Image (cartoon, rainbow, N blue to C red):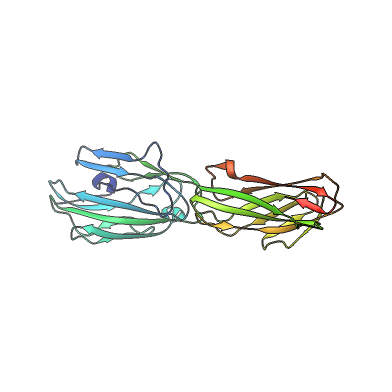
C-alpha cells in the first residue's frame, strides 16, 4: 500500500541552514521549526530574510517511519502570487538515497522524490532557488494545500544592506588659484552589493561654473550642486567622481565650503553616519587658496 503526501513539510525535515549568495539576515523568528508528532518529523527553515539576486539553498531529508510506503513531495505556494514571480530559477539534486529528484517553479512540484520510499528508507536533496532581481519587496506566506498541512512559514524579501561612505577631498593650485578640484571617494563597505550610488555635492557660493566633470556627473547652476551616479558597487569597491569648481572674484578671508552626501535607492544603509562629508577651503590672499 502506498500513501502520497502532498506536503514536504509534513514528511520532510528541512534540516540544514539556508545559504545565500549575498549576506543573509537573521531574524528573531529564525529558525522556524515544526515537529509532526504523527510522523515523528522535525522541520526546520532558517534565514527567511533574503535579497533580490540571492540564491537560497534548502536541504530536505525524509525518513519513512511506516507502516506504509510513501511518495514525498514539496509543493508550497506563496499566498497571493506564484513561485515564478518570486524566484527566477530552481535546481535540485539528490544527496542521500537512491531516489532521483525533480523540481519545477511552474507546471510541477517544487520538489518530488521519484518512486516510493519503503518503510525505514531515507532520502535527501538540495534545492537551490534564485530570488528574482526584480522580486517585489515584502513578506510572503507559503501554504501547503493538504489535510496534513503544518503551520505556514514566512519569507521576506528586503533590500540588500550596503554601508556607503563618502570621503570628499579638495585641492587648489598653490598660486594664482581661480578654481578648486574636488574628488568624492564613494566606498561600499558591505555587506551587500548596491546597484549604484548617487552622490550630491554642494559647491561654494563663489562658484561661477564647473568643468572637467566625471562621466555620470551633472551640474545644477541654480542650486550650485553637482550630482554624480556610479555603477554597481560590490563590497570593497570605490568610485571616485571628480570635477573642478571655477571661482569668481576672490575676497580675502572668504570661506569656500563644500559638502557631499551619498545615497542608494536599491540598498539599505546600516550606518548612515558616514554618508556625508565636507571639505573646506579659504582665501588667504588675493592669489592663494588653502584647502
Residue 4 shows in this picture: no
Residue 169 pos. (x, y %): 66, 52
* Closer to the camera in the image, 33 or 253: 253
Please tell me which residue is depicted at 38% across the width and 56% down the height of the picture: 129
Q: Is residue 3 left or right of residue 225?
A: left
* Closer to the camera in the image, 87 or 57: 57
Q: Is residue 66 above or below residue 174?
A: above
Residue 235 pos. (x, y %): 49, 54
Please tell me which residue is depicted at 21% across the width and 37% down the height of the picture: 37
* Closer to the camera in the image, 225 or 257: 257
Residue 147 pos. (x, y %): 28, 42
* Closer to the camera in the image, 4 or 159: 159
Q: How many marks?
A: 0
Please tell me which residue is depicted at 60% across the width and 45% down the height of the picture: 275
Please tell me which residue is depicted at 23% across the width and 54% down the height of the picture: 124
Residue 286 shows in this picture: yes
Residue 62 pos. (x, y %): 21, 50
Amino acid at each position: 500500500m502506498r500513501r502520497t503526501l502532498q506536503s514536504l513539510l509534513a514528511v520532510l525535515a528541512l534540516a540544514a541552514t539556508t545559504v545565500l549568495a549575498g549576506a543573509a539576515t537573521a531574524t528573531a523568528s529564525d529558525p522556524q521549526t515544526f515537529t509532526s508528532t504523527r510522523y515523528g518529523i522535525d522541520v526546520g527553515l532558517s534565514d527567511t530574510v533574503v535579497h533580490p539576486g540571492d540564491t537560497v539553498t534548502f536541504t530536505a531529508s525524509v525518513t519513512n517511519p511506516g507502516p506504509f510506503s510513501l511518495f514525498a513531495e514539496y509543493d508550497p505556494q506563496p499566498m497571493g502570487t506564484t513561485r515564478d514571480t518570486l524566484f527566477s530559477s530552481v535546481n535540485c539534486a539528490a544527496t542521500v538515497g537512491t531516489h532521483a529528484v525533480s523540481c519545477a517553479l511552474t507546471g510541477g512540484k517544487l520538489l518530488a522524490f521519484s518512486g516510493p520510499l519503503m518503510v525505514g528508507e531515507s532520502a535527501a536533496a538540495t534545492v537551490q532557488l534564485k530570488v528574482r532581481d526584480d522580486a517585489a519587496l515584502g513578506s510572503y506566506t507559503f501554504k501547503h494545500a493538504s489535510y496534513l498541512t503544518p503551520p505556514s512559514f514566512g519569507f521576506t524579501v528586503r533590500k540588500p544592506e550596503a554601508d556607503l561612505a563618502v570621503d570628499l577631498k579638495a585641492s587648489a593650485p598653490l598660486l594664482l588659484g581661480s578654481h578648486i578640484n574636488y574628488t568624492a571617494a564613494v566606498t561600499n563597505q558591505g555587506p551587500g552589493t548596491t546597484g549604484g550610488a548617487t552622490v550630491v555635492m554642494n559647491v561654494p557660493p563663489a562658484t561661477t561654473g564647473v568643468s572637467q566633470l566625471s562621466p555620470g556627473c551633472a551640474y545644477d547652476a541654480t542650486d550650485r550642486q553637482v550630482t554624480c551616479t556610479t555603477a554597481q558597487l560590490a563590497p570593497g569597491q570605490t568610485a571616485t567622481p571628480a570635477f573642478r569648481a571655477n571661482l569668481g572674484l576672490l575676497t580675502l578671508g572668504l570661506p569656500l565650503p563644500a559638502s557631499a552626501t551619498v545615497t542608494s535607492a536599491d540598498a539599505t544603509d546600516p550606518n548612515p553616519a558616514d554618508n556625508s562629508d565636507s571639505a573646506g577651503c579659504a582665501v588667504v590672499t588675493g592669489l592663494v587658496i588653502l584647502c
